[in-house]
Image (cartoon, grey):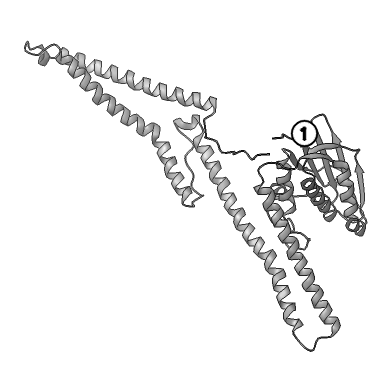
Amino acid sequence: MKNRSKQRTFRLKGNHRLKLSLLFTVTVGLLIWLTTIIVFAITRALRDSPLFQVGHVPPHTFAYVFVFMCCVIGVALAFLCSRTVFRPLLRLMDAFDEISHGNYAVRVSTTGIFRIMKIGERFNKMAEELASVEMLQREFIDNFSHEFKTPLSSMGGFASLLKQDDLTPEQRHEYADIIISESKRLSTLSSTVLMLSKVEKQAMLTNVSRVNVAEQIRRVIALLDAKWAEKNIEVELYAQDVFLEGNASLLDEVWINLMDNAIKFSYSGEIVRVDVTQTDSHTSIVFSNTGERMSEDTKKRIFDKFYQQDLSHTTQGYGLGMPIVKNIVNLHNGDIQITSNDLFSTVIEILLPNEQERE
C-alpha cells in the first residue's frame, strides 16, 4: 500500500471562478465604454472648434488626437478603477504579512466589491483558526510539562529519602513503591503520547483486515472488569457479531479508551451501555453512561490534547484518550458524535464504514 501525496494546487471552485471572470469582464467593459464616450465627446468638440477649422490642419490629426486621448483617459480611468477594486487585495496582502509575523489578531474589512468571493470572511476565519491553534500549542506545552514534572519531582524526592540511613524497612518499601508507581505513570504517559503521535502522522490506514467489533468490545469489557466491578457498575452490551474492515489494533485502542471513560465518569452503581448495530454501509457503536453532563465548552474541546473537564486533575488520566480516538476514527473515514438524552448523560456514537478503500 503506497502513500499518495495529498498536496495539490489550489483552484477556485467553478461558481467563484465564474463570478470573478464576470467581475473582470464587466470592469474592463465599463472602462472601454467610458473611455470611448469621453474621447468621442472631446474629439467632436475639438473638431467643431475654430482651432480645427483652419485649412492647414491635416485630416488625420483627429485620428492622432483620438488615439492619444484614448491612451491618457484610459490609463487614468484604469488607475482610478484599480485603486477602488484592488484596494481590498492590497489590504489583504498587508494582513497576510501580519499573519506571517505572528499577529493573529489582524482582521480585514468584509465589505466592498470583493464581497462576491467573501475573501474577507474567509481570511478572518483563517486568522481565528490560527490563533486557536497557537493557544492549543501553548496549552499542550504547559500541560505536558505539568504531567511530566510532577512524577519526576516525586521520584527525585523519594529517591533522596531512600539515601537516609535511619529509615525503617517499611518506609523503604513504601518509598520504593511510590517511585515504582510514578515511573509506571511516566511510562504510561510516554506510551500514550507516542500512540497519539503515531496516529496523527499516519496519513493512510494500514493493516486493514476483517474485524469482529462485537468480539473486540466483549474482550475490552472483560479486560476492564476490575474497574467497573470496583464501582459496582453494571455493563450492558447489545450486539451480535458485526464485522467491518479496519485496523484491529487501532480499533482496540478506541474501544478501550471509550469504555474506560464511560466507567471513569459514571456514578457508582449505575449502568454503562454499549450498542452495536450495522446497516448495509455503516456500523454504529454507541457508548452510553450516567454521570455529570458535559458542558458545551467541554464538547467543543474534548478532542484537544491534554484537555480535561476536571481542572483539579483529581480524575486519573492525561486528556489524550479522546484525541487518540478522534484520529483513529478519522483514519477509518468515520465520524464521532457526543450527545445526551433522558436516560444517559453522555452518549458517544462512533460511525464507521463497513469497507475501507484499499490500495
- Give the vertical position of 176 relative to 357 (above or below): below
User: Could you tell whether 113 is left or right of 256 in the image?
Assistant: left
Residue at 72% in and 50% down: 324
Percent coordinates x, y for residue 237 in the rendering = 91, 44
Q: Nearer the viewer, residue 80 or 182?
A: 182
x and y percent of residue 281 in the render?
A: 79, 30
- In which quadrant of the rendered image does the C terminus lie? top right
x and y, in percent, of residue 269 in the image = 92, 54
Q: Using the rendered view, name the quadrant where residue 230 is placed.
A: bottom right
Q: Which residue is mark 1?
A: 355
Front in this rendered view, residue 220 or 307: 220
Q: Amino acid at mark 1?
A: Glu
Pick out the residue farthest to the bottom. Answer: 166
Q: Residue at x 87, y 37 (%)?
A: 242
> Which quadrant holds the N terminus?
top right
**Quick one: 207 or 185, which is closer to the camera?**
207
